[in-house]
Each structure stands twice: as structure tokens, then as C-alpha cells.
Image: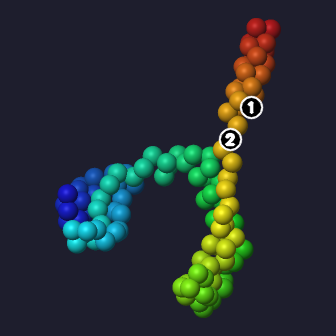
Amino acid sequence: MNEKEVAEFLKEHPEMTGLVQFVARRLKNGRVGYWRTTPYTYFDPHPNQLKTRIALAETAYKNWGAKGLECYEGKMIPPVAARNAEALKGKKFKKPDVEKTFKKLKKLAEIIGKATTT
């Protein structure tokens, strides 16, 4: 589907708007981008994706209102972007411990089992 066909489709079916996204990239064949279905993690992110999004939002909120340009890694970019990049550089978010989660779920199941039998 080209851009015109997708636009017509979305006019006919506005409920599908959130399920399709345009990825803007310059490709080898000269195309500027392509359409794809929205990844499921857009609506239901993994825990680490959620932690990353929250960390980015917090640093952006702290640096809000800065004007002008700053040099970051040899490029002139907005100061909020430079400060966000510096704050999140090399930051990693640990994966949740699956064993601890299962132990907690097991305890909860036992508690619920006891509560329903009495």
C-alpha cells in the first residue's frame, strides 16, 4: 500500500488509526519510509521498556524550558535532548527476577486458597 491508499483506508476505517504507523526512513531504493502495523509493545510495553520511558520522561521534565542549542558528541542539538542523552547514557534497567515473582505468586495463591476454603 502506498501513502495515498493508506490515507483512504484510514478515512474509511478511523478505528484502525492506532494500529498502523508510518516509519520514516530513507531506504536504499529511494523510498522515504514504509507503513507497518503498530508493535504490540506500543500499547503493552515490557517492564524494562516502561522503566526506560519513565526515566526519559523524568529527565525531560527536569530539563524542560531550556532554549538554544548545546554541543553533544560534536553535534548541535536542543539542550533538553543533550541533557537527556547525558543522563541516560549507559543506564541499564534490570530485568525482573522471575523466580521471586513466581514465589510471590505461589504465596498469593496459597493465601487465596486458604481464604476460599474457610
Residues marked 2 and 1 touching at CB (< 8 Å): yes
Give me the disc on residue 100: 1
Image quadrant for the N terminus? bottom left
Q: Residue at x 62, y 46 (%)?
A: 47
The residue shown at (71%, 30%) is 99
Residue at x-position 65% and y-position 59% = 54
Q: Is residue 95 left or right of residue 74?
A: right
Residue 115 appears in the figure: yes
- For the residue carrying disc 2, how many other residues have a C-alpha within 10 Å: few (<14), some (14-19), or many (20+)? few
Residue furthest bottom in the image:
68
Residue 91 on image: x %, y %? 68, 61
* Disc 1, SS: helix
* Image coords of residue 25 (percent x, y): 34, 69
Q: Is residue 105 above or below residue 13?
A: above
Q: Residue at x 28, y 52 (%)?
A: 13
Indicate left or right for 29 with 101 as reference: left
Residue 14: which quarter of the image?
bottom left
Q: Which residue is mark 2?
A: 96
Q: Is residue 8 above or below residue 93?
A: below
